[in-house]
Image: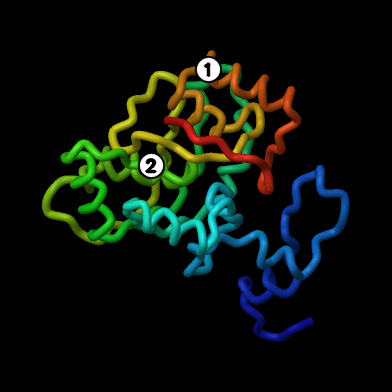
Amino acid sequence: EVQDETVDALLERCGHVPLPPYIHREDIDNDRERYQTVFAREPGSVAAPTAGLHFDQALLASLRAKGVQLAEITLHVGPGTFQPLFEETVEANHLHAEPVAVDAAVLREVALARREGRRVIAVGTTVTRTLEHAAREGWLDEAFENRSGETTLFLYPGARFLAVDALITNFHLPRSSLLMLVSAFMGTERTLAHYRDAIAREYRFFSYGDAMFIA
């Protein structure tokens, strides 16, 4: 027992990296580095925003060299991300609140890109949810300020996307809000077709799974 230990310190000392079930071993020290994105700056997330795991510094440098403009936002993935949808009617489900924080400079860049007809490509469903929350709250309007708060935004088929034009995301679990977001983005039938193909090709799902680019 450690006296006067904070919760964060206790989690750091005793916690384990949540490996997907197809990795048939216990987590090791190296997983703490691998289960972390190159964008990580602040503690507070209960899990890595997994779409970011597909990027390293070399890839980011290559994107910049091609003229891709990169903008970073703070993500604190909450436990509600992993909670399955229990209600049979999609609209009857509600998501836990998740912290969001976006700097004024990023809001300005996103708004400018949309005005100029350039694509806003979100890396991950959490980024998508954050930017769509920002659009609905008027954060993409002048004047731009550093913004933070919480969102309970639930994006499912029929939702309109006001900020994001394309999405990079992992393959998600059935009955998850993340799969609902993907279905909202590219349509239910198209999503199901892609997932049938992913299963047939034995793609990997979950945290260390494969990703797709949805445009």
Judging by the rendered image, the residue that carries numbered circle 2 is 121
Instruction: In the displayed orientation, state which residue is furthest to the right.
Output: 25
C-beta proximity under 8 Å, tags 2 and 1: no
Q: Which mark is residue 190?
A: 1
Q: Amino acid at mark 2?
A: Ile
Front one among 117 and 169: 117
Image mark count: 2
Q: Residues within 10 Å of mark 2 (few under 14, many from 20)?
A: some
Q: Earlier in the sequence, mark 2 or mark 1?
A: 2
Front one among 2 and 70: 70
- Identify the element where label 1 is drawn: helix
- Could you tell me which quadrant the C terminus lies in? top left
Where 211 falls versus 200 (above or below)?
below
- Identify the element where label 2 is drawn: strand
Q: Amino acid at mark 1?
A: Arg
Pinpoint residue 61: horizontal percent, then vertical percent: 44, 61
Residue drawn at x 24%, y 60% as measured from the top left: 105
Residue drawn at x 17%, y 40% as measured from the top left: 116
Pinpoint residue 33: horizontal percent, then vertical percent: 66, 67
Instruction: In the displayed orientation, state which residue is furthest to the left.
Output: 142
Pinpoint residue 186: horizontal percent, then vertical percent: 45, 23
Residue drawn at x 50%, y 57% as measured from the top left: 59
Identify the image quadrant of residue 17: bottom right
Q: Residues within 10 Å of mark 1 (few under 14, many from 20)?
A: few
Pinpoint residue 181: horizontal percent, then vertical percent: 48, 31
Where 86 falls versus 211 (above or below)?
above
Q: Tell me if 191 is positioned left or right of 161 in this view.
A: right
CA–CA distance in space, label 2 to label 1:
19 Å
Identify the image quadrant of residue 70: bottom left
